[in-house]
Amino acid sequence: MKKKLLSNALVFMLVVATALTGCSGGKSKKDSQETKKGETTSGGSVVVGITQDLDSLDPHNTAYAGTREVLFNLFEGLVKPNSDGDLVPAVASDYSISEDGSEYTFTLRDGIKFHDGNPVTVEDVKYSLERYATGSSASAAFAIFEEAEVVDDSTVKVKLSTGNTEFLSELTCAILEQANDGNEQTNPIGTGPFKYKSYKPGEELVVEKNTEYWNNPYPYLDEVTFKIETDVDAAVMELSAGSIDILQYLTTDQASTLGDDFEILHGSVNYVQGLFLNNSFGPLKDERVRQALSYAIDKQSISDFLFDGYSHVIGTNMIPAFAKYYNEETENTYSVDIEKAKELLADAGYEDGFDLTITVPNNYEPHKGAAEIIVENLKEIGVNATIDLVEFTAWYDDVYVGRNYEATVVAVDGTLSPSSWFEKNVSTSDNNFTNYNNPEFDEKYNQAVATTDDEEKITLYKELQTILSDTAASVYLEDPANIVAINSKLGGYEFYPVAAQDMSIVYYEK
Amino acid sequence: MNKKKTYICMGTIIILVLLFLSILSIFWTPYSPTKMNGPLKNAAPSLSHLFGCDNYGRDIFSRVMSGLGNTFFIALCTVLIGSIIGTLIGLFTGYYGGVFDEIIMRFNDIILSFPSVLLALVIISVLGKGTYKIIIALGILFIPSFARMIRGETIKVKKLGYIESAKALGLSNSRIIAVHVFPNIFPKLMTNVAVGFNNAVIAESSMSYLGLGVLPPAQSLGRMISEAQSFLFTCPWYACFPGLVIIIMIIGFSLLSSGLSE
Amino acid sequence: MKKFILKKTAALIITIFVISIITFLAFSIIPGDAAITRLGSNATPEKIAKIRSELGLDENVLVRYFKWAGNAIRGDFGESLQYQGHKVSDLIEGRIPYTLMIGALSVLILLIISFPIGIIAAKFENTKIDGIILVVTHVFMAIPNFFMGIVLTFVFGVSLRVFTPGKYVSPTDDFFGSMGYLIFPAIAVSLPKVAMVVKYIREAISHEMEKDYVKLARAKGCTENRILTGHVLKNALITVLTFMGLVIAEILAGSVIVEQVFGVPGMGKFLVNAILKRDYPVVQAVVIYVAIIVVLCNTIVDVLYAVVDPRINLEDM
């Protein structure tokens, strides 16, 4: 009896483990994803330009992807993502998941230490998970976390209130040292490939090699400086001058000014940029109106104008990089068809068009660009759109929390947990800023989250994408291109499908 | 005298030409200033597109035509508000002095010290958005400098011999200010207006990123130049032509004000 | 004299008090607060309420103000809301040197260059070069800060390699070495101002030259230079002084755009970012810094009025 249960559990675990792998980095046809692999050397220091200031050094209390990208180098969770999007053991060396998905058992990695030399204990793991649950970084998905039970000196059991096979991706949350409690902002201590050296707020974060890092031979570099560059044009000049070695989010024009000293890589930012529609606003309540907008907007031209065509045009709220769940068919749901759009508008009673205010936050230049293109497109179907540019903080307050808007161009992201890409469209969600209300969607979502069968999960999530696309919950534009310039002397840089700039795999070529 | 007349002439001509182009743009521009054109993206200046095209393939000449009116209007209104209210404050505080002067000047300092970004956000909150709300924000921000400059002049002029005798004669203060002080400082006021106009044109687009000012798809020269920042080395015409027009506008205005300060 | 200093100090204190209240109230009017900026897309009404109470943002605004003021008077400006764990005074201490150095270099450039150029420009008033001077002055006045910054960085930084863009040094670490970098933002900041001062000087001299006393002096046989230095300049000085006061205060408050283009962590950028992130403890402190500078500069200018023109009395002002 016991044996059968055990073998079932093993098979199940194997199935689940493979279910969570298979996330390829967004490879669109024109991608050059990685630097050529030259021979690695150990040592050297690199300066990485980051365009957003860090909002926190405490990984349990940070809100921005830009910060997580950097902190990825200092902290690790029980598991961590690799560049393919697979979750590999990190602080834990092994794990198993119960058949119903409500218990995750982790074996602590033998000999793993914190940056200050102290060994990582199971108490630290328990402390970290409980702390993360009450911190501001935890998303809605972490709500089912019930407790972390210390089984013995090297085993921790994570218990959930309901079975959920996606929870593993939540356990990438950082494991911190309990003894360091209270000092997270001034002396961050983790288990990652680099350790904290110094921080000048608003200027730079310097990290140095963790010589006792568990994953040999990483890291290669001795030191990495994350330099905060608020003006991208100034940053490009610093690249040319040699003050920075790596810079992301360039425009094709900026990249073209750099010479042979730099390699230009094309990846995706892994966000869904869209014209998000307030489904409670007048004309947008009607599905046909929203579909009309989807037929009128020329998404390819947005990618062409803003990114020289390097972006991946999408049709639903999911990034292509999440290949396992991504429903490619949604890309074809709408193509530019002005006549069809006008027809739909007339059916809905808006043959004379209507006025639409598009609120655009000022945190990302391509949002403004996309909005300008959209305004032009919408003219053709009689929709008189105007742009309301707002400061980022005001956008959060008015649009995201207050839901006081008509339409907005913004980018949303998710985690390696597929449900995170759909949670915002659940009608009862706190983050349902588009006021999307579709009982069929809600039901399917709950089914998708609850099921432990991998095939079923994939099918359901793909169906959810089709629903979003068919009902035109919003107009999904693109996963914008991420153009990165990197010093030719460096090798090993890889794109991750989540917020991470992994400097442990970067090295100076011989 | 001749020089002043030439100044007024040239200034007026320049302003009139720009005004004409601006009014014309309401009815006609060579191309649509907002229509985007893939193949023309970043096109260099040519016979068909005198100023070239921008990164959306839009004709820059047409955009400049429709934008210069906005820029000129906003800058002009800003300078009017700043100079009229500022001059009044400057004249009275400079003339009367004392505690009155002290209090007003400290409030003046408060406006000077207040962060412009914060003022913009407050105005957006209280008065809402709208292209012309920027005029209120900038107008307020321009008052203190005019006030200080005019006050300085008034203090100096106040001590002139014939002002003292006018007082002795028993003329009312307001009469003295209006008839004797003001004409004396008028030339300096004109210089301030010219410099103020210059600064207003530059400031016109400084708050667009907050939502205050001329927002897309409407055009403004200032915003065109700041958007051209990323293309400075690859497509210099994107910044140079609006910049050129701005300089011409400012010179025209300056000539006019210099001439009037006769 | 003593009365003057007392009066001015009292005025300064009251000004600081008033502006700190106004700034504080401004934060209650504008949308968003530090709780929202901390949560970002994780913001839910529940989480927002929790952080608001942690930060004390849910208390009555006047109560909060007096708590802040009580600490500020004792020199404790509190902790930054965006850089958790860092004191406002520490953050400012790190940044003021850059702004002051750029300011000092800009003022030097202004003082050294504008007078000679202004006077020479005035001399050419009725010649053919006048037109060219006019155009050149206006071109420099109109050039936007960022444009000047980028051109300077490209020419001197990338092409000629006189300095390395991005590799700035704090004046507290290396006083003279930092000048090698900070001179360039100083040039970007001061050149448009130099053009303006030149314009003021030119026009002031031009206006004075038409006055009767100049004609009288000429008739008496005074040389042009003597007239210039003896009378005209003195009269033009008031205008230039007032303008300098305003410009110097503005420069010392920090120029956001120039700091951004050169990557220098100065007070201008610091203030703007703090406002956008609703980090009001920082904003309060910086605004007070700026207010002190502005009041000081303008007061000094007032005193200089009396120095330059003996007919003006300090008591009148």
Image (cartoon, grey):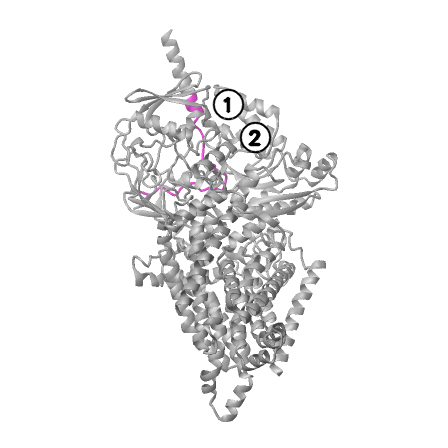
- Image x and y of residue A462, in percent: 55, 27
Q: Amino acid at mark 1?
A: Val
Classify residue C154 as left or right of residue C25: left
Query: Measured along the vertical axis of the image, is residue B141 above or below residue A389?
Result: below
* Near-viewer residue (C5 or A382): C5
Element on which disc 2 rests: helix
Residue at image x 57%, y 41%? Answer: A398
Q: Nearer the viewer, residue C28 or B59?
A: C28
Locate residue A55: give its quadrant: top left
- In this rendering, would A267 be left or right of A398? left
Q: Label 1: few (<14), some or many (≥20) within 10 Å?
A: some
Q: Secondary structure at mark 1?
A: helix
Identify the mark at residue C5; answer none if there is no mark.
Answer: none
Q: Is residue C154 visible?
A: no
Which chain letter goes with mark 1? A
Could you tell whether A241 is left or right of A444 in the image?
left
Please check the rendered image and state whether residue B129 is part of the magenta-colored stretch, yes or no: no
Q: Confirm whether the magenta stretch covers residue A20.
A: yes
Region rendered in magenta: A16-39
Parent chain of label 2: A
The secondary structure making up most of the magenta span is loop
Q: CA distance from mark 1 to mark 2?
A: 14 Å
In the rendered image, the vertical position of residue C108 relative to residue A145, given as above or below:
below
| Residue topped by disc 1 | A449
Q: Are marks 1 and 2 on the same chain?
A: yes
The residue positioned 34% from the left and 31% from the top of the image is A175
Please provide percent x and percent y for residue C315.
46, 71
Where is residue A400 shown, x and y percent of the image?
55, 38
Towards the viewer: A190 or C54: C54
Identify the amino acid type marked 2.
Asn
Marks 1 and 2, the one that precedes in the sequence = 2
Pointer 2 residue: A425
